[in-house]
């Protein structure tokens, strides 16, 4: 699995084609269309969470991805090494 991922909003097939073409020869980059049906994380959660709780970090990342998809049309994610 490539360490760099571009997720492109469903309503931006033009941007998907552009990025897929641009990074086609890059083995460390994957470009995909957003497969989610609806925006699952419209607002970041506002609750106390113990430090180091990975689930909260995952939700925060998902909220940031949703925000980037709405505002930029794409989100860039760095995957942790396998």
Image (cartoon, rainbow, N blue to C red):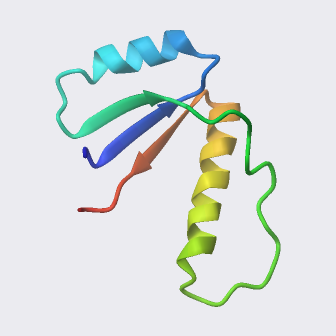
Task: Tell me the quarter of the picture where residue 17 sits.
Answer: top left
Residue 13 vertical placement versus 42 (above, below) = above
Left or right: residue 68 versus residue 21 is right
Question: What residue is rendered at 74% in x and 51% in y?
Answer: 41
Image x and y of residue 31, in percent:
38, 29
Image x and y of residue 30, in percent:
32, 34
Residue 10 vertical placement versus 54 (above, below) = above
The C terminus - image quarter? bottom left
Question: What residue is rendered at 17% in x and 35% in y?
Answer: 27
Question: What residue is rendered at 63% in x and 40% in y?
Answer: 68
Q: How many marks?
A: 0
Question: What residue is rendered at 56% in x and 32% in y?
Answer: 35
Decide which of 40, 69 is in the foreground and name it: 40
Image x and y of residue 34, in percent:
55, 31
Task: Tell me the quarter of the picture where residue 12 sits.
Answer: top right
Left or right: residue 53 versus residue 44 is left
Image x and y of residue 36, in percent:
62, 36
């Amino acid at each position: 699995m490539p360490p760099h991922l571009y997720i492109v909003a469903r309503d931006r097939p033009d941007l998907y084609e552009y990025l897929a073409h641009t990074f086609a020869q890059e083995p460390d980059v994957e470009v995909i269309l957003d497969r989610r049906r609806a925006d699952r994380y419209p607002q970041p959660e506002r609750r106390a969470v113990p430090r180091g709780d990975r689930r909260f970090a995952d939700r925060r990342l998902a909220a940031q991805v949703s925000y980037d998809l709405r505002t930029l049309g794409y989100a860039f994610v760095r995957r942790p090494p396998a």
